[in-house]
Image (cartoon, coloured by chain):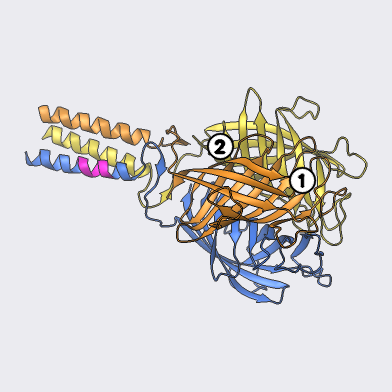
Chain colours: A orange, B yellow, C blue
Amino acid sequence: MEITRFVFSLLFLVMMTVGSSGSPNHWRRKRVREPCKKLVFYFHDIIYNGHNSKNATSAIVGTPAWGNRTILAGQNHFGDVVVFDDPITLDNNLHSAPVGRAQGFYIYDKKEIFTAWLGFSFVFNSTQHKGSINFAGADPLMNKTRDISVIGGTGDFFMTRGVATLSTDAFEGEVYFRLRADINLFECW
Amino acid sequence: MEITRFVFSLLFLVMMTVGSSGSPNHWRRKRVREPCKKLVFYFHDIIYNGHNSKNATSAIVGTPAWGNRTILAGQNHFGDVVVFDDPITLDNNLHSAPVGRAQGFYIYDKKEIFTAWLGFSFVFNSTQHKGSINFAGADPLMNKTRDISVIGGTGDFFMTRGVATLSTDAFEGEVYFRLRADINLFECW
Amino acid sequence: MEITRFVFSLLFLVMMTVGSSGSPNHWRRKRVREPCKKLVFYFHDIIYNGHNSKNATSAIVGTPAWGNRTILAGQNHFGDVVVFDDPITLDNNLHSAPVGRAQGFYIYDKKEIFTAWLGFSFVFNSTQHKGSINFAGADPLMNKTRDISVIGGTGDFFMTRGVATLSTDAFEGEVYFRLRADINLFECW
């Protein structure tokens, strides 16, 4: 009967494991929030201001009625839509060799303070990374750090999900800013 | 041999449980669709029309060639891009204390009837909720209810996914509308 | 002891299966990447150019300072924002009966070559499909194929995720293009 008792203990263990790996009726995950992949990048945005067409990596393409497209609008730029194709670097130097491009848009969306809404991708095509990471979310950019969602990915980042913590690493007037993105992926396929 | 038969029955049970909790080669979930979290909010949109700059919570920032930015365009506003920062309330009263902000954009995207495409976040920073819920999807706004996707979240809503059912709770002309959002989250971490 | 050995083998098998179906502390899935649903559609985009208002399914609604809204801008259309409501067909014929609508926007986002960023939905309301599939991602449209993310869905596509491979099936000047979308869903509820 020793064996039988042992077998039952094992069975119990197995069933506990099964139980904790996914509740059967909905997907409440009580996992340790430990990323399956961590990445840090910087990206650099130079807004077109009428005089820097050679260097500009972004441009205002929509404004409210009171705005124009060569200078960010009053009221904390509320309503300005900016399209960008920014170089991604591994360190905080604009002139480092880019490892990819940050492409998409942001919209300033509050009159009282600076906040933005972002929809964009990191696009990689290097020996190190191939594929894209897609992001969306609110960016209350006056906060030291703010979290946006990683909503999907392709290639090396197939089906990924996670959270990216953005911080403003530097800015110069209203023409240049540099963001640091600490990407923590919690779903890796 | 009684014990052996019993052990086999148990094993069978365990294997069935494993089988239903996640097929090993792809992620076909046959779960009961029961939300892990349910939330109801209202948000209030007052579009800038050239005369209400103090109260307006949104503004037209893009239009087709035939439109302008102080009045929604003809052809069911096709092509109008609106940026918003709307108060979120717990009841349907515009003047209730806001519990957060709905921030992002919508685009009217059909000539024949009113439909829109939405990309926005609910941003909370109160004692009750901290963090954001991110949404995207089509809003065929003439339907009594319509579903959009919850594509991610941060803070209290870390990594969440789900569906939000929108309904137009009220509107006044083309300046004010109030949406009710019934948020059902099916992935909670 | 034969039976005991057999039971242990079975237990071992079960535990391996459990182990591979989900690591308990984070969500690193080592699954075979086999879709739970595969779909192929075509969609057709006719950009408004000032002369085709009857047939146009899309319109330029934002441009950089150097652009206008009846012709795509120079510099590879960088900064042009286009809103669309395109018919979806099962084959590559523009005149086939549409099975749904592709609704949303794209933004040309690079000065040196053609690339775009997409946010849109496939909206179905037919006997075959009811519901929507939501997409987001970078579209380096000079590549023969490119992957974007399926970030969510509603109705028949409730909570789905996956990858859509886009390819340009045809284009005529800068007014008409047809995309083929090979949709592979890897999460089906």
Give the letter of the chain under mark 2: B
Which label sits in the foreground, 2 or 1?
Answer: 1
Q: Identify which amino acid the numbered label 2 is placed on.
A: Leu
C72 relative position to C153: left or right: right
Where does label 2 land, which residue? B185
Determine the residue positioned at 74% across, 50% down.
A175
Tell me where the magenta segment starts and ends, as one range: C11-16
Determine the residue positioned at 27% across, 35% down.
A14
Residues at circles 2 and 1 in contact by the CB criterion of under 8 Å:
no
Instruction: Point out the residue furthest to the top here.
Output: B127
Q: Which quarter of the rendering shows the N terminus of chain C? A: top left
Determine the residue positioned at 85% across, 49% down.
A67
Residue B59 pos. (x, y %): 82, 45
- What is the number of the mark on residue B83? 1
Determine the residue positioned at 54% across, 68% down.
C145
Asked if residue C15 is among those painted magenta in the image, a careful observer would answer yes
